Image (cartoon, rainbow, N blue to C red):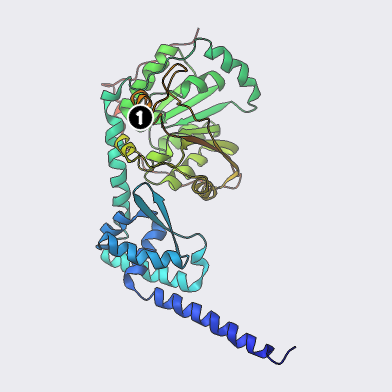
């Protein structure tokens, strides 16, 4: 050992002490403690944090910046918004864990912790209003080739497990054109009565008799009980679902709980984009990148996750439609956006999320009956 070697240990200790001192200094500001606690509760936009903290957005951004630089929070850009969440794994540090405890205490005292749920509900209000409008009827009607049924029947035997499929947020039932022809049985649910009436008319017109329609939220008692009674789904489909969810992580966990052990979850949604006009379609999120989808999948205990881009063509337009941005916008608001698919399997040891309390469903009242689908011939 050289003569200078003994100096290395004190130098290393001095460097570590300096780093810890900086961490203590960073967490000595009450606003940062509260910000950290709120970001641990839910991924929140800077504007939402400003509302909860009672601070201006520039001040919130100023406090979030050093927390991001220290690796305590992740700041994700989405269109014109910046979203802040606690970085994975940092709460294992005893100093940060103590800071989170102190921050939560401050937030409970000022009431901001309990108001996080109000912020999430406010996200949901626009989506509910948008999908409850019956004026959208027929907006997404598509003509399918008459031989589609034969094509799907030919492909069906290639799917090893097709006893039960779930269509989450079925809307007007467009995906049922495929699922009802491939799976033995399908449970399709949506929280909006207006959407389910449109879906029922589709089923009646097609003569599908192997589809059950259900009004309810993902994770609600009615949905969970219906699918649980059948032993869980072989495949749970969530097509263009997550970008409407106020809490995508919780939504994916609830979707995963609907699958049987080793059952699949298929998410089809937008790749990241910057078209703020899509918020007028009740979109809460401007797509998800692969890293974000994989993070959500880990939180839902999905395994063997695959994320792939889908072919860059309109899912709504016909082969003869024009490919200009404007014509796509006329045919469907999202026709110009890139899509991607994430597929994963439910781990056999995954714990189901808490079941929500159901609200009364007007769809079940005698005064508003659902049209009965005709049997297939």
**Position above or below: 341 against 153:** below
Residues 79 and 224: in front is: 79
Residues 173 and 254: in front is: 173
Number of numbered labels in the structure image: 1
Residue 354 seen in the current view = no
* Mark 1, other Cα within 10 Å: few <14 / some 14–19 / many ≥20: some
Residues 269 and 272: in front is: 272
Residue ranking furthest to the top: 377
* Residue 134 drawn at (x, y percent): 27, 24
Position of residue 89 in the picture relative to residue 282 (left or right): right
Residue 268 seen in the current view = yes
* Residue 308 drawn at (x, y percent): 56, 37
**Badge 1 is on which residue?**
333
**Position above or below: 74 against 363:** below
| Residue under the point 31% across and 20% down | 369
Quadrant position of residue 331:
top left
* Residue 121 drawn at (x, y percent): 30, 46
Give SS at disc 1.
Answer: loop
Quadrant position of residue 127:
top left
């Amino acid at each position: 050992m050289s003569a200078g070697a003994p100096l290395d240990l004190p130098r290393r200790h001095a460097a570590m002490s300096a780093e810890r001192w900086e961490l203590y200094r960073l967490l000595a500001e009450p606003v940062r403690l509260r910000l950290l606690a709120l970001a641990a509760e839910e991924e929140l936009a800077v504007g939402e944090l400003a509302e909860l903290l009672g601070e201006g957005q520039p001040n919130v951004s100023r406090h979030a910046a050093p927390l991001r630089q220290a690796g305590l929070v992740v700041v994700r850009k989405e269109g014109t918004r910046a979203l802040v969440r606690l970085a994975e794994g940092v709460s294992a540090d005893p100093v940060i864990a103590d800071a989170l405890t102190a921050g939560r205490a401050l937030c409970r005292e000022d009431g901001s912790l309990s108001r996080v749920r109000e912020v999430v509900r406010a996200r949901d209000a626009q989506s509910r209003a948008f999908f409850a409008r019956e004026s959208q009827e027929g907006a997404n009607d598509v003509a399918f080739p008459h031989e589609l049924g034969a094509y799907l029947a030919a492909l069906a035997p290639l799917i090893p497990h097709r006893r039960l499929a779930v269509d989450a947020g079925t809307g007007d039932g467009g995906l049922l054109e495929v699922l009802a022809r491939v799976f033995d049985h399908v449970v399709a649910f949506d929280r909006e009565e207006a959407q389910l009436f449109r879906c029922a008319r589709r089923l009646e017109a097609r003569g599908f008799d192997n589809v059950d329609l259900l009004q309810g939220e993902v994770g609600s008692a009615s949905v969970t009980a219906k699918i649980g009674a059948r032993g869980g789904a072989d495949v749970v489909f969530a097509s263009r679902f997550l970008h409407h969810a106020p809490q995508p992580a919780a939504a994916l966990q609830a979707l995963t709980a609907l699958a049987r052990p080793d059952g699949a979850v298929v998410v089809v949604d937008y790749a990241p984009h910057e078209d703020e006009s899509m918020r007028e379609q009740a979109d809460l999120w401007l797509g998800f990148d692969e890293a974000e989808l994989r993070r959500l999948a880990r939180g839902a205990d999905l395994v063997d996750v695959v994320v792939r881009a889908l072919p860059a063509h309109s899912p709504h337009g016909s082969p003869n439609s024009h490919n200009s941005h404007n014509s796509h916008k006329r045919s469907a608001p999202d026709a110009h956006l890139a899509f991607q698919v994430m597929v994963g399997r439910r781990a056999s040891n995954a714990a189901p999320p808490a079941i929500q309390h159901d609200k009364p469903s007007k769809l079940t009242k005698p005064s508003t009956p659902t049209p009965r689908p005709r049997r297939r011939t």
